[in-house]
Image: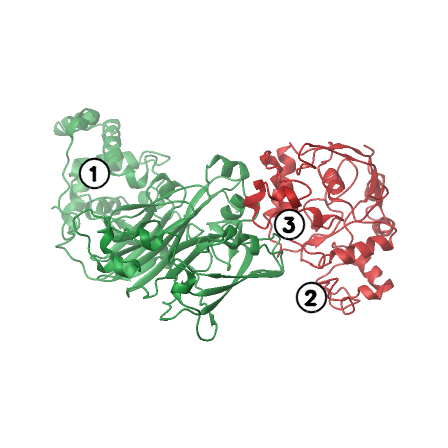
Chain colours: A green, B red
């Protein structure tokens, strides 16, 4: 395989040449990349200088569409900006282009890039740039050290194709990176990249604040946490809200998506995963080889990948660092919203969900106890609550959390929930029939999906509701099986739910 | 160290005599700093860790817009419309509304910023003074309200870092608001960066990661930056800032104060 790939092998060739056998590594064209091509072999820049179009995340500049190398002028402005890192939490980010990650730079292999680094007059700090796509000392850092209100210029040839991280390398380097000073530069192969329906730009970073996660106010950088590698936040595109809600990435069913994903670090390695998708191809480490049918791909700090996949079914696909506490407890969550018709052949939605106890049966003793009592018609509220707790922990706590707190912005709280407590019939109906769309709970809007709990019988629903309506500060009487039966009788099960 | 006599008097007269005190403070309100042995963040040489600081005097507060305005009026060659490009870049005093007017973006009691090293030196010379050296500045700035060297105190570091976290786009506070340190000197942290006489000798490589490169010893007189002590980084950031400058550069958060005595 290796021998078959000619010296000029590129991504495109790597794309076109299929692997000879399942599991084979296509395009490990070491000879082509050893030391990289010479500038001469790529051709001299032609035509008038071109100004690079930069794009702010999650957007990617348009393809280069040039079949010759040019002199490309890149103007990148460093700005120190105070912005929200999380709701009500402010942070002074140091940025390339005003955003985290910085502006996306797109050039063609062989281009001569005239780089202008401008440090905004309002900056407090000097800054520079190390572009991993540059062959030269410091990747340009030594030539771009720039005081506030000044500009540096240096020029390089983009010898290697690939997707490259750039970052600030001013002392203390880790602090400049931790404040958001990183971004991506794509060096297209001479032939360009195959057309896709969407290209998106996502970059992970870890952040260290003096205050705790979601502690409000302007939060200074915490050097000790950074040294200890204990981030307060792990984020995609620099804030918790960057890629959710109205700002989610979007696509339609049947489209092809290319993600350029970088990891600025400064410390963590990313286990990048899109829940409910499988990458058709991942150009791991941003190189010319790709792997197919990838679930989770590793992105080193200071590294990047290209991932391609196509959408088959609609829904919200959650993008996470699969070091999963980072996703649910430090903010490493983004959403890809895919609209279009269902494809039940590929994915049915929930059809059956019946109880399976396995060796957990012992832990559900309380459930058996109440079941026996119910048969005699005499469960006590305490019995119901004990049984409800066991069921809740197995069925509901994954989303609503073991203490009923929910997850801010994603899963509504049950503890002291006005929505839960104000209407018992509605609560029963939601367990029976599910709930889709916006609801307001304790003044906050949640817009997500709860599937119908069709696997639960009337007794079990009564017990769960008796538990949640008498826990964590909630107080109410028992919910009876008859209450549930009445709602079951008077409402319609959704399609696909077990009756 | 002694109490801050002027500060006490000003407090006592806070309501009626504020202007009087301010006026008194503007005329070279310089405070004696007793010398001593000091371990700077940048080792003075390959085999040396400490330097001896001789006693000197240092301005209590950074030079203000009002003070610099009177200098420019007395020495019009330093007006922004007359200064040669060799001695100051385009943004020299750019926040003033005119060559001899402060205007709304430059309050009299704010520290003067947008000044070049040449201009700062000329100002000090006109007061029969000089810019402090880096070691003098660092030595004095290591103090807090009670200790001459508070650098191991997390509170001291956090105050400095708190300033780094504030965007420079926010308004520069007026001088004299900061708590006096043990010498009675104010605003060494938390207001502006400050020029020093020998900033050009503070060579941090443009690419800070090469600071352990032995080649640097050949031309970096101060030797390679020692980052052994991670608590030093608030000061190292100041070194990094100063080393990004040329003598004609000016920035929106860079001012100065003068020193006297023990001319190096």
Q: Quadrant of residue B184?
A: top right
**A401 and B255: which is toward the camera:** B255
Mark nearer the N terminus (2 vs 3): 2
Dividing the image into 4 quarters, which one contains the C terminus of chain B?
A: top right
Give the structural element (helix, strand or loop) at label 3.
helix
Secondary structure at numbered mark 2 = loop
* Label 2–label 3 contact, CB within 8 A: no
Residue A65 percent coordinates (x, y): 35, 70
Q: Chain of mark 2?
A: B
Report the front residue among A39 and A156.
A39
- The crowd level at tag 3 (other Cα within 10 Å; few <14, some 14-19, many 20+) is many
> Residue A89, how many percent across, how many down?
50, 48
In the image, A109: left or right of A145? Answer: left
The residue labelled by disc 3 is B241
Mark 3 vs mark 1: give the one in front: 3
Q: Looking at the picture, how far across and down is residue B102, in whole percent?
A: 76, 64
Q: Any mark on residue A4, and which?
A: none
Residue at point 74%, 48% (across, down): B196
Residue A440 visible in rendering: no
Q: Which residue is mark 2?
A: B90
Q: Nearer the viewer, residue A170 or A134?
A: A134
Residue A435 in the image: x percent, y percent?
25, 50
- The chain letter for the residue carrying disc 1 is A
Q: Chain of mark 3?
A: B
Residue A461 disc label = 1
Compared across the picture, whether A11 is left or right of B155 comes to left
Horizontally, residue B114 falls left or right of residue A235, namely right
At 80% from the left edge and 64% from the top edge, which residue is drawn?
B78
Marks 2 & 1, CB-CB < 8 Å contact: no
């Amino acid at each position: 395989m290796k021998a078959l790939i000619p010296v000029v092998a590129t991504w495109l060739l790597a794309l076109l040449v299929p692997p000879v056998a399942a599991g084979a590594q296509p395009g490990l064209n070491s000879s082509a990349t050893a030391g990289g091509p010479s500038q001469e072999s790529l051709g001299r820049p032609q035509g008038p200088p071109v100004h690079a179009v930069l794009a702010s995340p999650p957007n990617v500049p348009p393809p280069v569409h040039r079949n010759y190398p040019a002199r490309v002028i890149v103007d990148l402005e460093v700005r120190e900006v105070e912005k929200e890192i999380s709701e009500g939490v402010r942070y002074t980010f140091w940025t390339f282009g005003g955003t985290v990650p910085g502006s996306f730079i797109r050039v063609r292999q062989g281009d001569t890039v005239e780089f202008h680094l401008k440090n905004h007059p309002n900056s407090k700090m000097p800054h520079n740039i190390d572009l991993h796509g540059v062959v030269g000392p410091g990747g340009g850092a030594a030539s771009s050290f720039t005081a506030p209100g000044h500009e540096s210029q240096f020029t390089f040839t983009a010898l290697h194709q690939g997707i490259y991280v750039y970052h600030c390398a001013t002392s203390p380097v880790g602090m400049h990176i931790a404040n958001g000073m990183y971004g991506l530069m794509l060096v297209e192969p001479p032939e360009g990249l195959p057309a896709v329906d969407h290209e998106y730009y996502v970059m992970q970073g870890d952040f260290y604040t003096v205050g705790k996660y979601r502690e409000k106010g302007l939060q200074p950088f915490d050097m000790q946490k950074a040294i200890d590698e204990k981030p307060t936040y792990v984020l995609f595109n620099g804030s918790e809200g960057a890629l959710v809600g109205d700002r989610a990435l979007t696509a339609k069913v049947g489209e092809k998506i290319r993600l350029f994903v970088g990891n600025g670090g400064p410390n963590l390695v990313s286990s990048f995963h899109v829940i409910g998708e499988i990458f058709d191809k991942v150009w791991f480490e941003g190189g010319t080889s790709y792997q197919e049918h990838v679930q989770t791909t590793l992105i080193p700090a200071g590294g990047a990948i290209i991932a391609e996949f196509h959408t088959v079914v609609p829904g919200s696909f959650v993008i996470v660092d699969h070091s999963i506490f980072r996703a649910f407890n430090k903010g490493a969550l983004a959403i890809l919203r895919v609209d279009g018709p269902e494809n039940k052949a590929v994915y049915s939605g929930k059809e059956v969900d019946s109880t399976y106890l396995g060796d957990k049966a012992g832990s559900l003793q309380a459930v058996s106890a109440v079941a026996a009592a119910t048969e005699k018609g005499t469960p006590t509220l305490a019995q119901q609550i004990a049984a409800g707790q066991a069921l809740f922990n197995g069925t509901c706590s994954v989303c609503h959390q073991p203490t009923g707190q929910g997850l801010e912005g994603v899963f509504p709280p049950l503890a002291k929930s006005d929505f839960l407590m104000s209407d018992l019939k509605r609560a029963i109906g939601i367990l029976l029939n599910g709930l889709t769309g916006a609801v307001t709970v304790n003044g906050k809007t949640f817009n997500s999906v709860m599937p119908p709990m069709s696997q639960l019988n009337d007794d079990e629903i009564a017990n769960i509701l008796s538990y949640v309506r008498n826990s964590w500060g909630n107080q109410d009487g028992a919910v009876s099986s008859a209450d549930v039966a009445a709602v079951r009788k008077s409402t319609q099960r959704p399609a696909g739910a077990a009756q | 160290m002694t109490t801050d006599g002027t500060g006490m008097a000003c407090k006592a007269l806070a309501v009626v005599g504020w202007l009087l005190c301010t006026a008194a403070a503007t005329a070279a309100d310089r405070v004696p700093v007793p010398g001593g042995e000091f371990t700077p963040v940048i080792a003075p040489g390959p085999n040396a860790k400490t330097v001896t600081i001789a006693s000197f005097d240092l301005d209590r507060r950074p030079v203000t817009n009002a003070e610099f305005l009177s200098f420019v009026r007395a020495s019009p060659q330093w007006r922004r419309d007359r200064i040669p490009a060799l001695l100051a870049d385009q943004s020299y005093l750019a926040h003033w509304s005119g060559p001899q007017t402060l205007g709304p973006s430059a309050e009299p009691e704010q520290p003067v910023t947008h000044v070049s090293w040449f201009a700062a030196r000329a100002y000090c010379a006109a007061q029969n003074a000089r810019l402090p050296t880096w070691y003098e500045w660092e030595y004095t700035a290591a103090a807090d309200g009670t200790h001459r060297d508070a650098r191991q105190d997390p509170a001291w570091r956090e105050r400095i870092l708190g300033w780094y976290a504030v965007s420079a786009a926010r308004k520069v506070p007026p001088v004299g608001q900061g708590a006096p340190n043990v010498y009675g000197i104010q605003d060494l942290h938390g207001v502006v960066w400050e020029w020093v006489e020998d900033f050009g000798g503070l060579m941090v490589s443009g690419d800070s990661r090469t600071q352990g490169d032995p080649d640097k010893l050949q031309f970096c007189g101060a030797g390679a930056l020692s980052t052994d002590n991670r608590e030093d980084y608030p000061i190292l950031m100041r070194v990094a800032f100063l080393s990004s400058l040329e003598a004609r550069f000016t920035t929106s958060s860079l001012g100065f104060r003068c020193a006297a005595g023990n001319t190096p």
